[in-house]
Image (cartoon, rainbow, N blue to C red):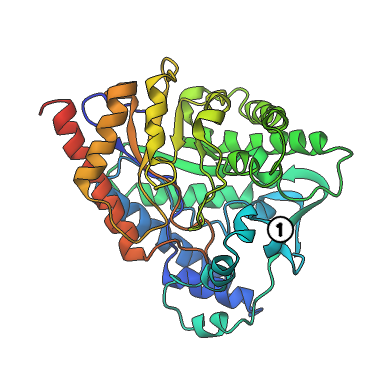
Amino acid sequence: MKRSEDRIRTTHVGSLIRTPELVELMIRDRLGERIDEQAYEKALRDGVRAAVKRQADIGIDAIDDGEYGKSNWITYLCDRIGGLELVKAPEDREGKIWPEQERFGDFYQRYAEFESTQWLPDAPSRRRYHGGQIAEYLNVVCTSALKYKPAPLERDIRNFKAALEEAETDEAFMPVVAPCSMEITPNQHYRTQEDYLFALADTLRDEYRMIVDAGFILQVDDAILPMQRFMLFQGKDFAEYRQWAELRMEALNHALKGIPEDRVRYHICFGSQNVPHTSDPNLRDIIDLVLRAKAQAYSIEASNPRHEHEWQIWQDVKLPEGKILIPGVVGHATNIVEHPELIALRLENFAELVGRANVIAGSDCGFSQSWNSPRVHVQVQWAKLEALVEGARLASKQLWKH
């Protein structure tokens, strides 16, 4: 993995807002219409090519395919792992997720109404989608023994490599889910939850290895590790959560066994939703767990108002030798575009504490964790990445005095 040797390098977390063509096809699929497979494959190739070129033109150093080949950052594995099935979620699913709902009930009711549609690209079928014809939610359930199916990832790798041939960049990465985050899907097959967790780790190792063998940096996404503190362990002793989290970190490292650490980035966040986040755990309370991941780089939220102050923990938490920090210096869930001078200031704060060569500028989270959940308008997404590059340039000028 390349370091910031003579300037602050740039990247982002991964998911980008899908093209109108892909959104149209996904809506029609969810409406139960038959989709022309060749048309979908062409839209996917064209979308990846455009996303890769746009990132490279902006000046992002480590780029990805936008995760365009995935329906969702977790449920995509239904296409890649046998033994997982999509089923209709319980109708009361909304009431069991966020502990803040009692305090912010009116807000959550309104938020649920527009969360998945507010920034969808214009598409011919969008009105029918907004009309509630596909209101049901789908959950992933493990119903039989897990077995990896490589064809979908082979397609995504092929599309990504083809797009990279037309772009100027020196590093590329592919995001995937962590065993802990995938474990949130119900287990109806394995004898114990621990058996299920490590079966996931064993199966995901195939995916991880394929990405590294293809020459890409592997990014492991693990939002659920911190989020379970306020979901599964709400109101419980912190020691119970730590015991749970330590086993999940063990499973992650089991999945990463044999993969060089310098080919791995580990990303955590506290949920990508644009909600109050008053129940988020403190980064200081879990940072030692995060640093146990056998990765060279750690991608962590650092720009949103709930977590921006946490850059100060690096005054007394030492970044291990040889490691890299990828702080989020632009947000993913607000349409306000950060000023480059603010981005530079954030980067300089981190560089002062962990060393300028150990900092890469990133985003808090992805811009669209599902095809139908863009967090900002697509024009704002690209403006934020442009500001990220400019802010890194300003910080580099100050840090290297050039």
Is 87 rendered above or below residue 6?
below
For label 1, the SS is helix
Q: Residue at x 57, y 47 (%)?
A: 279
Residue beneath the point at 54% across and 49% down: 271
Residue drawn at x 37%, y 44% as measured from the top left: 303
Residue 166: x and y in percent read 31, 50
Viewer-side residue, 388 vs 25? 388
Dividing the picture into quadrants, the one containing residue 17 is bottom left
Q: Is residue 190 left or right of residue 126?
A: right
From this view, report whether residue 205 is shown above or below residue 315: below
Q: Left or right: where does residue 221 sit relative to residue 19?
A: right
The extreme top residue here reads: 321
Residue at the image position 59 percent from the left and 39 percent from the top:
226
Between 16 and 103, the residue placed more toward the observer is 103
How many numbered markers are drawn? 1
Quarter of the figure with the C terminus: top left
Taking the view exactly as shown, the residue that stands out farthest to the right is 191
Residue beneath label 1, please? 96
Q: Is residue 101 visible?
A: yes
Q: Quadrant of the N terminus?
A: top left
- The residue closer to the viewer here, 1 or 246, is 246
Taking the view exactly as shown, the residue that stands out farthest to the front is 103
Task: Give the image location of residue 195, x and y in percent.
Answer: 82, 34
Report x, y in % for residue 373.
Answer: 51, 63
209 sits left or right of 397 in the view:
right
Looking at the rendered structure, the kind of residue marked 1 is Lys
Q: Residues within 10 Å of mark 1 (few under 14, many from 20)?
A: few
x and y percentages locating residue 175 in the rendered image: 51, 43
Classify 140 as above or below 315: below
Residue 214 visible? The answer is no
